[in-house]
Image (cartoon, rainbow, N blue to C red):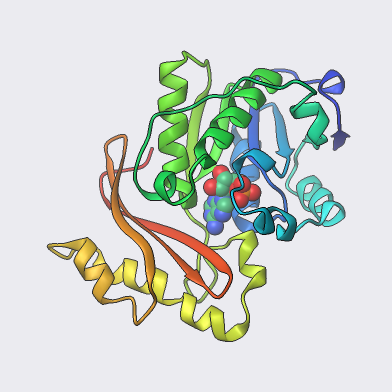
């Protein structure tokens, strides 16, 4: 596996698959890398903790980083190129152009500017790596909806693949931020996936979800359309850690 830090050093061939990440790899990331490996000739994983998509400065500073372990895991997953640009490579002096996808609800309202940062970095990565396919997790379903919109609106020549959310045995969706939970917080956090499960099939899933949260105060509980699929999405803060999760209620996230 080649570890590449500058755009000029990137080399690919054949059908290219891109997995954009912010590192601190877990099985969720690895499932995307394996899916890319199965479908592509060159697998590029980008590892960039994108300052533009963080709101609270403390969140960016506390974001887990483990470059050596990440490189090892990516190599084991069969990744060809680990692209680890510095901030100056992605946002050179004078940077002034942003992709602003008009979207509301859920994370868009809870984290103003978040999707602008996500859409901008993803379009840059698509232009730099030129992948035929890009792989994303259902865990961040609204991100997929925003990127689908951008790809359609700006005629970006890439196909987006969405892979199911990988969970721990207790049901909690894997997230780099889970490392910050104490064991008591983790127990409380389990209300999130449990309530999503309980709401599935209910006549009013939003109300059913709220009722099943076991005292956990949600930031929002909302229905989200992604293509033909309808999802139930929620966010909640447990201690200082903010968690998001979702389930598909109807249709398929293809
Ligand atoms: P991140 O490093 O958090 O930006 O995530 C990089 C990619 O991994 C995104 O497409 C996420 O949706 C995806 N991802 C994160 N957590 C999971 C998970 N538990 N299962 C599947 N994909 C995930």
Q: Is residue 78 left or right of residue 138?
A: right
Give x and y (percent) for residue 73.
78, 53
Q: In the visual, does 76 lie left or right of 226?
A: right
Q: Residue 90 occupies which quadrant of the picture?
A: top right
Q: Nearer the viewer, residue 81 or 83?
A: 83
Q: Nearer the viewer, residue 216 or 189?
A: 216
Q: Residue furthest left?
A: 203
Query: Image check: 15 left or right of 82?
Result: left
Which one is nearer the viewer's eye here, 128 or 55? 55
Point 48% across, 43% down: residue: 112
Asked if one can make out residue 31 in the rendered structure from this viewpoint, the answer is no
Q: Residue at x 44, y 52 (%)?
A: 110
* Residue 199, picture quadrant: bottom left
Relative to 160, residue 14 above or below: above
Q: Pick whichever, 180 or 11, lies toward us.
A: 180
Which percent across, then down, holds residue 64?
73, 59
Tell me residue 61's x, y (percent): 74, 56
Q: Name the residue located 73 percent from the left edge and 40 percent from the top edge.
A: 48
- Tell me, yes or no, if residue 114 can be seen here: yes
Task: Name the image quarter holding the N terminus.
Answer: top right
Drawn side of residue 238 relative to residue 225, left or right: right
Mark count: 0
Note whether 184 is above or below 173 in the view shown.
below
Percent position of residue 213, x then y:
33, 76
Say which quadrant the C terminus sits in: top left
Residue at image location 24% in from the left, 75% down from the top: 211
Q: Is residue 85 above or below residue 150?
A: below
């Amino acid at each position: 596996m080649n570890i590449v830090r500058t755009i000029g050093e990137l080399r690919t061939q054949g059908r290219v698959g891109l997995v954009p990440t912010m590192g601190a790899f877990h099985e969720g990331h690895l499932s995307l890398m394996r899916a890319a490996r199965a479908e592509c000739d060159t697998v590029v994983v980008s590892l960039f903790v994108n300052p533009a998509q963080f709101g609270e400065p403390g969140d960016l500073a506390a974001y887990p980083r483990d470059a050596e372990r990440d490189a090892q895991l990516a190599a084991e997953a069969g990744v060809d190129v680990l692209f680890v640009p510095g901030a100056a490579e992605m946002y050179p002096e004078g940077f002034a152009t942003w992709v602003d996808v008009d979207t509301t609800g859920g994370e868009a309202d809870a984290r103003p500017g978040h999707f602008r940062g996500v859409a901008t970095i993803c379009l840059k990565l698509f232009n730099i790596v030129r992948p035929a396919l890009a792989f994303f997790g259902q865990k961040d379903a609204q991100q997929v909806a925003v990127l689908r919109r951008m790809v359609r609106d700006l005629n970006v020549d890439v196909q987006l693949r969405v892979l199911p959310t990988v969970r721990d045995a207790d049901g909690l969706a894997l997230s780099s931020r889970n490392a910050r939970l104490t064991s008591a917080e983790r127990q409380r956090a389990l209300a999130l996936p449990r309530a999503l499960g309980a709401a599935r099939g209910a006549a009013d899933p939003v109300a059913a979800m709220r009722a099943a949260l076991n005292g956990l105060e949600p930031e929002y509980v909302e229905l989200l359309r992604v293509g033909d699929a309808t999802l139930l999405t929620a966010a909640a803060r447990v201690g200082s850690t903010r968690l998001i999760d979702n389930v598909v209620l109807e249709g398929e996230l293809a």
